[in-house]
Image: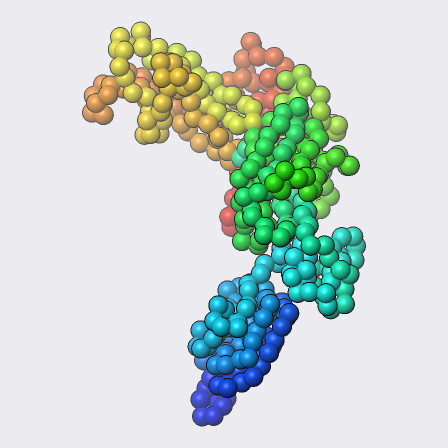
């Protein structure tokens, strides 16, 4: 609904706009039942701020508004704030719904037998229609997936659905990947009305493994994905390649992600990825890390999460009590309080060139510094690539990771601009 009206009505600049009613005056006997407003309002260039917009207009009086709904996108209200009657007033039942609720068939069911909706296939309808195909009283669907790359590898599954007396806390998703079962019982509700369940920390060598997803509500299985047709990170990435061929930065990132998985697979001696994927041919820039006696060893662990681990040698500075910091933040021992190991984890690929400064010092911040070591993930990757002790698969993995990090950072920079 759009208007450029800028004149006056009854000597006032006010204009009233609504999906079913623009203005329902005092003593009006209007009755609306089983109605949905899924439209939007568009302000014309001349429309003044006095325009009073609401999905059901401005209400002074009605006989009844029952079982009515509106798509609450872009901050649209059920009625204008000047209304005497609002949702929750006597005989006023107006409920905001999301696009996901419309798409799922929930609203079509609530509107009653006059409405229906085709919920699957090429003829799928995104909102209820009069006289449409009848919908069930309860229904759940795994609607889509979204892969996160550039940080940890994770897959978000988007769920829509409804049931009598529905309680979101009753939904749970069971994932199976590489023989490991992960149950996610606390999803989240996003702004579009989808319930989101995330499979986090996918190991890179498992990019070709099938991901099985089983959605349950209470004790009942209500939807599955990956059982009738294989679905993997590799398949997802290859689909993205086909879809975004004109996005050079994204294509490069996807290819380097697949090459990272292929190199990790070879390093781990694992077999899951079907394609023979190659990435960018960039060489890791030369670098040198200055050693310190206080920090005996340092390493980067590449798995589901990318971590840096250092080992402190108290005998080199003769103190049993000390503090370890990374970039000014104090670290705890890993994996136990008495361990000489310290760790930072979940490092994003976009941060492979970030420098991490580890400092071993006395408990007094102004006291002695026993040792200091500064390096980046890329410094470590270069060291692996030049090491005579490293295997060929380790060197290939180092190069693949470097290229993955560069592409992730370049793509992120373009996205932020």
- Asked whether, in this view, residue 188 is left or right of residue 258, the answer is left
Q: Position of residue 167 (x, y in %)?
A: 56, 48
Q: Position of residue 221 (x, y in %)?
A: 68, 39
Q: Residue at x 48, y 68 (%)?
A: 88
Seen in the picture, residue 191 relative to 388 is either above or below; the reply is below
Q: Residue at x 57, y 12 (%)?
A: 390
Q: Position of residue 32 (x, y in %)?
A: 61, 75
Q: Residue at x 31, y 10 (%)?
A: 314
| Residue 293 in view of the camera | no
| Quarter the N terminus occupies | bottom right
Q: In the picture, residue 337 is in which quadrant?
A: top left
Q: Looking at the image, which is closer to me, 395 or 320?
A: 320
Count how many numbered circles sit on residues in the image: 0
Q: In the picture, residue 133 is in which quadrant?
A: bottom right
| Residue 145 in view of the camera | yes
**What colouring style does the render use?**
rainbow
Judged from this view, the residue extending furthest toward the bottom is 11
Seen in the picture, residue 199 relative to 64 is either above or below; the reply is above
Q: Looking at the image, which is closer to me, 338 or 265?
A: 338
- Asked whether, in this view, residue 148 is left or right of residue 58, the answer is right
- Asked whether, in this view, residue 401 is left or right of residue 355, the answer is right
Seen in the picture, residue 229 relative to 158 is either above or below; the reply is above
Q: Residue at x 75, y 29 (%)?
A: 275
Seen in the picture, residue 417 relative to 66 is either above or below; the reply is above
- Asked whether, in this view, residue 283 is left or right of residue 86, the answer is right
């Amino acid at each position: 609904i759009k208007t450029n009206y800028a004149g006056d009505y009854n000597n006032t600049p006010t204009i009233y706009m609504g999906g079913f009613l623009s203005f329902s005056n005092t003593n009006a006997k209007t009755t609306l039942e089983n109605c949905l407003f899924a439209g939007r309002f568009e302000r014309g260039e001349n429309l003044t701020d006095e325009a009073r917009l609401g999905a059901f207009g401005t209400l002074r009086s009605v006989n009844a508004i029952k079982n009515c709904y509106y798509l609450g996108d872009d901050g649209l209200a059920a009625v204008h704030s000047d209304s005497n009657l609002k949702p929750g007033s006597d005989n006023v039942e107006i409920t905001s719904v999301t696009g996901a609720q419309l798409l799922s068939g929930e609203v079509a069911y609530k509107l009653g037998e006059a409405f229906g909706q085709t919920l699957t296939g090429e003829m799928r309808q995104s909102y209820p229609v009069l006289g449409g195909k009848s919908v069930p009283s309860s229904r759940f669907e795994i609607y889509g997936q979204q892969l996160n790359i550039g940080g940890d590898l994770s897959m978000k599954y988007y769920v829509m659905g409804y049931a009598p007396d529905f309680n979101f806390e009753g939904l749970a998703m069971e994932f199976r990947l590489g023989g490991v079962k992960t149950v996610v019982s606390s999803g989240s509700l996003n702004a579009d009305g989808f319930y989101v369940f995330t499979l986090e920390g996918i190991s890179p060598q498992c990019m070709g493994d099938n991901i099985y997803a089983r959605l349950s509500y209470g004790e009942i299985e209500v939807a599955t994905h990956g059982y009738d047709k294989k679905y993997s990170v590799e398949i997802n990435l290859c689909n993205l390649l086909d879809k975004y061929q004109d996005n050079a930065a994204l294509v490069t990132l996807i290819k380097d992600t697949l090459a990272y998985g292929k190199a990790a697979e070879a390093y781990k001696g694992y077999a899951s990825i079907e394609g023979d994927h190659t990435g960018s041919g960039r060489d890791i820039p030369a670098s040198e890390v200055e050693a310190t006696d206080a920090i005996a060893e340092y390493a980067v662990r590449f798995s589901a999460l990318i971590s840096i681990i250092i080992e402190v040698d108290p005998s080199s500075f003769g103190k049993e009590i000390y503090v370890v910091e990374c970039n000014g933040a104090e670290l705890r021992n890993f994996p136990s309080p008495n361990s000489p190991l310290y760790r930072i984890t979940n490092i994003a690929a976009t941060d492979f060139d970030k420098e991490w400064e580890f400092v071993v010092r006395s408990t007094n911040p102004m006291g002695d510094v026993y040792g200091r070591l500064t390096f980046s993930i890329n410094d470590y990757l270069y060291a692996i690539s030049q090491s005579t002790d490293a295997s060929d698969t380790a060197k290939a993995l180092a190069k693949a990771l470097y290229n993955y990090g560069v592409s992730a950072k370049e793509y992120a920079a373009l996205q932020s601009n």
